[in-house]
Amino acid sequence: MRILSHEIPSAVGQTVTVAGWVHRRRRLAAVSFLILRDRSGLAQIVVKGSQAQLDELGEETVVQVTGTVAANPQAPGGAEIVDPVIEPLTEPAATPPIELWRPTVGAGLPVVLDNAPVALRHPAVRAGWEIAAAALHGFRSALDGQGFTEIQTPKIVGTATESGANVFALDYFGGPAYLAQSPQFYKQTMVGVFERVFEVGPVFRAEPHDTVRHLAEYVSLDAEFGFITDHRDVLAVLRSVIAEMLSSVGARAGAALERLGVTAPEIPVDVPVVHFSEALKIAGADPDEPDLAPADERAIGEWALREHGSDFVAVEGYPMAKRPFYTHPQPSDPRWSNSFDLLFRGVELVTGGQRLHQYSDYVAALAARGESADAPAYSSYLQAFKHGMPPHGGFAIGLERFVARLTGAENVREVTLFPRDLHRLTP
């Protein structure tokens, strides 16, 4: 029976079988070493005598090895396999486009992305998704523990409502359709069914951004729940979710963090919160600015770290003019919204807030935009509000951006399996 490389140290003196990829071959005068890589790490196999077989096994050839485990403090995990019988499971592999055995990736990002099916095998490259997978586990675990129901909503939709200029149009059996920019309408509707829902799924933004922080397709971690008082209730749940995500990354992807030389931060119990108007002052921005520029976000992040020792800071009360029509206004001053952005190390990570929940408020909000609640774009969505919806709110986290900020990646594409942007549709 096959065992994994990380199990080898516990099998000293036993005959075992391992299988994986030839990660590296090292030849010395009297002995050679085959370093085998599987999903759990690296194993060292000692080959004595003829090296002819090793010469035929190029890096990335898939092999099965049976041999005896011997203790060796210098081997990975303190043990190695000796007296091996090596059986190739594939033809000799072609030379990889990058040297996967090197500790760091020597190739530039375009080369890595062009050759992603092989480049992702590099332990440092795959570490990004190991961290992402652990974060996903934490996201689901946190919300499961708080009584949320996981849902899946359509990604092909009939109307473009949130930002019509930034959608991907499709031919849907001869009629118009679009790739969903967000599950927003559906997750609000499902609050009327389950009260508390979340979704993990792709969203699509046809935004003409060619920056290090934007993708045309990314994984959105959405949550929506009812019976709240205001957006601060949403922020409290978000804080607990991110804490669980960070904990899960530390517990499940500790080796990946170590490979990248990264330590996961902690999110404080009381996340610093500043009003949008105050945030502009902190950033030294024009008080009439309707939004925060990237430079403003960086300045606010630096302030939070300096004044509160926190990598996280929430900016609440964004102007209603810059928020979607379903956003609940601040009751004391309707110029501002009961919404927030959570910044992580100076970059917007999460947008969240309280939504309108009265049907009449939706009619008024749409009329103010010159639109009708009876329009096809809104009629099915607003059915839920005609028939009673509780005060509710929610948030959305961009998974790739979360991992990029956590690892310090300069470009979000570094931690995306197969990124889609203005220039990339393959692999």
Image (cartoon, rainbow, N blue to C red):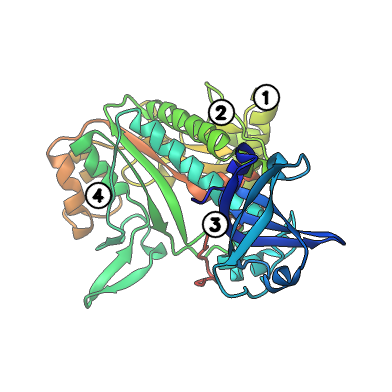
Pick whichever of labels 2 and 4 is earlier in the sequence.
Answer: 2
Q: Which residue is mark 2?
A: 267
**Which residue is painted at 44% across and 64% down in the image?**
206
User: Is label 3 in a helix, a strand or a loop?
Assistant: loop
Q: Which residue is mark 3?
A: 416
Q: Please say if 59 is above or below 4.
A: below
Mark 3 or 4, closer to the camera: 3
User: Is label 4 in a helix, a strand or a loop?
Assistant: helix
Pick whichever of labels 3 and 4 is earlier in the sequence.
Answer: 4
Mark 2 or 3, closer to the camera: 3
Pick whichever of labels 2 and 3 is earlier in the sequence.
Answer: 2
Type of amino acid under label 2: Ile
Residue 391 placement (x, y as % from top left): 26, 30
Mark 2 or 4, closer to the camera: 2
Type of amino acid under label 4: Ala
Residue 65, visible in the rendered structure: yes
Distance of mark 3 from mark 4, alpha carbons?
A: 40 Å
Front residue of 105/388: it is: 105
Q: Please say if 237 is above or below 402.
A: above
Task: Looking at this view, name the residue that lies furthest to the bottom.
Answer: 174
Q: Which residue is mark 1?
A: 307
Q: Quadrant of residue 34?
A: bottom right
Q: Which residue is mark 4?
A: 367
Q: Counting other residues with Cα less than 10 Å from the Cα at mark 2, is it few (<14), some (14-19), or many (20 or more)?
A: some
Residue 328, visible in the rendered structure: no
Pick whichever of labels 4 and 1 is earlier in the sequence.
Answer: 1
Residue 279 placement (x, y as % from top left): 58, 34
